[in-house]
Amino acid sequence: MIRKLLLGALLTWAATPALAQNGPPPSPWAPLQDHPTCTRDELKAATAAYVEAQRTGNISALPLHEKARFLQDMADVDRAAGLWNTALPIAHSQSFHDDRRCKTFTEIIVNQGGAPYVIGTRLYMHEGKIIRVDSLVTKPGDWLFNANAYLKYTQAENWQPLMKYQHTSQAEMIRGANAYLDAFSDKFTDIPWGQPCARLEGGAYTNRENRADASCEVGIPAGVLYIVNRDYLIDDEMGVINVFCRFGSSTGGPDSHTFRYVDGRIRGVRTLSVLPGPQADDNGGIIRAAPPAG
């Protein structure tokens, strides 16, 4: 019996290299870590450097790993090809930091210079180095885009650090974010809406009148649409969870949803979707297509 077990182990060991030879080649990028290590100060320094890099069009000052992976709109790009190499007149930026998962998320708004953008960039870190740069670049033509409106309402909202008694557990933040995203395929989910609450989607805004009783329960599009490939980032100090995901399938539209929690309830949602669609006006209204003539 023992001889059989030993023989089986030897055969398995001998077969392993042959199986490996038929598998995919080793990745050229630094691997994502199951349990990355970082400090909040490292994350904050990285986002400050990233914003300055986008302002100047030079990312050489970032603490990049030699095998860092670069993505734009969830597709691999060469380091030299990303928008981060273009100097942009940044009107506003805000960053969030997750020192458990070692990820950051930075929103950058550009409404001057002739080429407006709202950019959402993730940095993934491990042991002081950025191992992944992942940017979503929304621009005219993308879903409900309007950089002027996005700037106006982002600056009007109070997304400052919370008092400790206002915090929400990470598990509940993930549950609530998932409930919202699940609602696109199941209209009976329990979303923990608070009040007042506003949704800023590309540039369209649900509380243009600044009402104290504003609600985010303004409806989910009809039909069944699965939102997949969800990747979470949680900033406890800010009460924010950011989700990178895709609409419809693993190759669907790249998307970012950012939720602001206060006292266990969602009080704000911001979305960036790299999907073609209607546009928003400078006041945050949706520009509806004109009805056909006749």
Image (cartoon, grey):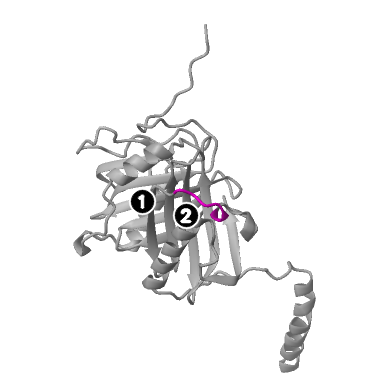
- Amino acid marked by disc 2: Arg
Q: Which residues are magenta?
A: 84-89
- Amino acid marked by disc 1: Phe
Residue 163 figure quarter: bottom left
Q: Nearer the viewer, mark 2 or mark 1?
A: 2
Check disc 2 and report the residue beneath it: 55
Q: Return the x and y of residue 241 as percentages of the image width and height.
A: 38, 56
Residue 41 figure quarter: bottom left
Determine contact: label 2, label 1, CB under 8 Å: no
Which of these two is toward me, 19 or 251?
A: 251
**Residue 148 is one of the magenta-drawn residues:** no
Can residue 228 be seen in the rendering of this structure?
Answer: no
Give the side of residue 216 with respect to residue 112, left or right: left
Q: Could you give the CA–CA distance between mark 2 and mark 1, rounded to whole angstroms? A: 26 Å
Can residue 63 be seen in the rendering of this structure?
Answer: yes
Q: Secondary structure at mark 2?
A: helix
